[in-house]
Image (spheres, rainbow, N blue to C red):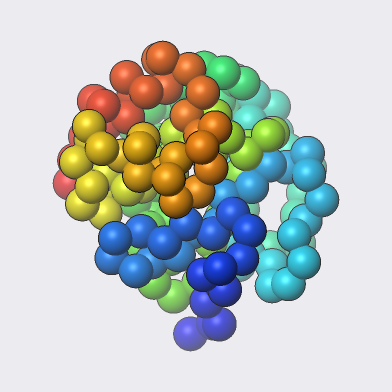
Amino acid sequence: MSTPWDASAEGVLRLPSGLLVRGRGLRDPLPPGAVPEFALHLRGRRPAAVAWESQWLRWPDFWLPTDRPGFGTALRALLARAGEQRVEVACGGGFGRTGTALACLAVLDGIPNAEAVAYVRAHYARRAVETPWQRRFVAHFPRP
């Protein structure tokens, strides 16, 4: 088992179960400290390669994932890895797509859909989940 994220580090969200997931913007420099062991990149175009394992899902800026079932599958896999590995979710700026994905992870971790956006805004970034359709997507994201 790897060393987990520092729960107080920038961009690290503690889910209700205690699992830690880092969110970040790919346009920003890599934060100091440990690097992820797995990253889920949410971009409209394939991002640059990284030195750790990663998965890319097509998700245009300010919109929604183009493969919604694939997105759900990817989040469930990322959540399973979070118990054993340092995982992160990243998009361009780290707020809209990343915040939406983190809110969906919170739903998978037991937060009610109607409370997930507020949870992520309180514990990750107040700008998380930028558009009305992203908020609606979280509200209707399938619970486990």
Position of 35 compared to 125: left or right?
Answer: right
Between residues 59 and 126, which one lies in front from this camera angle? 126
Give the quarter of the image for residue 57.
Answer: top right
Is residue 105 positioned above or below 129 on the image?
A: below
Residue 12 point in image, percent of width and height: 54, 59
Between residues 137 and 116, which one lies in front from this camera angle? 116
Residue 73 visible within the image: no
Position of 125 compared to 102: left or right?
Answer: right
Is residue 132 positioned above or below 118 on the image?
A: above
Between residues 79 and 77, which one lies in front from this camera angle? 79
Residue 135 point in image, percent of width and height: 37, 23
Please, which residue is most extreme toward the right here? 29
Residue 47 point in image, percent of width and height: 73, 38
Which residue does the image show at 64% across and 47% down from the upper left?
24
Position of 14 compared to 136: left or right?
Answer: right
Residue 83 visible within the image: yes
How many tags in the picture? 0
Give the quarter of the image for residue 92.
Answer: top right
Which residue does the image show at 57% across and 50% down from the upper left?
23
Which residue does the image show at 57% across and 18% down from the upper left?
62
Is residue 76 positioned above or below 25 on the image?
A: below
